[in-house]
Amino acid sequence: MIPRVLSGVQPTGNLHIGNYLGALANWVKIQHDCESIFCIVDLHAITVYQKPDELRAKIRELAALFLAVGIDPTHSRIVVQSTVPAHAELAWLLTCVTPMGWLERMTQFKAKSAAQESIGDGLFQYPVLMAADILLYQAAIVPVGEDQMQHLELTRDIAQRFNSLYGETFVMPATRLPAVGARIMGLDDPTAKMSKSAEGAGHAIALLDPPDRIKKTIMRATTDSNPAVDFNTMGPGVANLLNIHQAFAGSSNEQMRAEFTGMRYGDLKKRVTETVITSLEPIQARYKEIIADPQRLDSIITSGAEAVSPIANSTVQTVKERMGIYTRS
Ligand code: ATP
Ligand code: MG
């Protein structure tokens, strides 16, 4: 049986190299071995206030970026979460089997709520909606970055609890992390993961950043007080730069040691800059073409929803029947 894969990105901020190396590059690699569904999770985005016009534009931008990095729309489905109402419906049904204590332990909730003056209940429920996204399609593989591991574990717990209360219903999803690039750190602060929602010009490299900006961000990246690369004593900033290089270049650990041991930080940064710029150039060129054709984008999004809705609706129907909710006979 061909495994089903599901993953998603929030249409907030600017897609960055952490999202690419941690998730999207992996999607592209495995898409043809699987039945693949890639979501633009707009219902997740609104767990924190978004300006409506900006959110609308970001959804299209993200769909175009999915295509630009190499998602093949003739094989994989690109789905805007809100176009398939079953996501929200299953989320409610699962909310009712999820203990609050499980959600209170989520580190993303703690981090994101600390930055909010008023915390929406949606931010608290976020992991249940994510569990619904995955379980709705009985996805076996969920390729995400390391930061989402805790949410995936929770998804498994919710699935298990549902199965034990109402009978075997959900497939247990497993994740797939990339060998290198599962956790890219901020260039201004290598102790914090690179995030779309983080403030500050020196924090992230966006996939659509022009070359001069990429150069500036990398040349200003935080390193440490060593003069040159030493794999035994390097700090997190240097490790992050090397990680970024390795993930884009596909080098082995031995190749990395041979190429970078003893390299001065200025030269290291120049080398990483070159690699990032040349890796992003073709993505940016494709993006420009794709975003210029909104009708094609709309038709890909519409056909994505049409293709996956029967799977989603059938899961919700089964869940309702198992829970004893009214369904027409
Ligand atoms: P936000 O700050 O809005 O939460 P984000 O950068 O965390 O943005 P998400 O849309 O939450 O992006 O996550 C999309 C995908 O990218 C997920 O699979 C997530 O695990 C992955 N990801 C996010 N940040 C990183 C990172 N720094 N390194 C590797 N993978 C990442
Ligand atoms: Mg995130």
Image (spheres, rainbow, N blue to C red):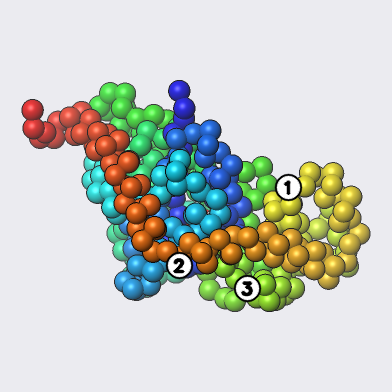
Q: In the picture, which quadrant includes the N terminus?
A: top left
CA distance separating discs 2 and 3:
18 Å
CA distance separating discs 2 and 1:
31 Å
Specify whether tag 2 is near ligand 1 (CB below 8 Å).
Answer: no
What x and y, as percent, mark residue 188? 65, 70
Residue that appears at 35% across and 37% down: 137
> Which residue in the protein does label 2 denote?
292
Task: Answer whether labels 2 and 3 touch (C-beta < 8 Å).
Answer: no
Q: In the picture, which quadrant includes the C terminus?
A: top left
Three-letter amino acid code at the position of disc 2: Ala
Taking depth in this image into account, of 125 and 259 the one nearest to the observer is 259
> Which residue in the protein does label 3 denote?
210
Is residue 153 in view? Answer: no
Mark whose residue sits in front, 2 or 1:
2
Tell me, for residue 209, which label it has, or none: none
Specify whether tag 1 is near ligand 1 (CB below 8 Å).
Answer: no
Residue that appears at 39% across and 40% down: 134
Mark whose residue sits in front, 2 or 3:
2
Is residue 286 in view? Answer: yes
Q: Residues within 10 Å of mark 2 (few under 14, many from 20)?
A: few
Three-letter amino acid code at the position of disc 1: Gly
CA distance separating discs 1 and 3:
23 Å
Three-letter amino acid code at the position of disc 3: Pro
| Secondary structure found at label 1 | loop
Residue that appears at 68% across and 76% down: 212
> Which residue in the protein does label 1 denote?
250
- Image-based side of 104 in relation to 234, left or right: left
Q: Residues within 10 Å of mark 3 (few under 14, many from 20)?
A: some
Q: Residue furthest left?
A: 329
| Secondary structure found at label 3 | loop
Residue that appears at 53% across and 73% down: 199
Task: Answer whether labels 2 and 1 touch (C-beta < 8 Å).
Answer: no
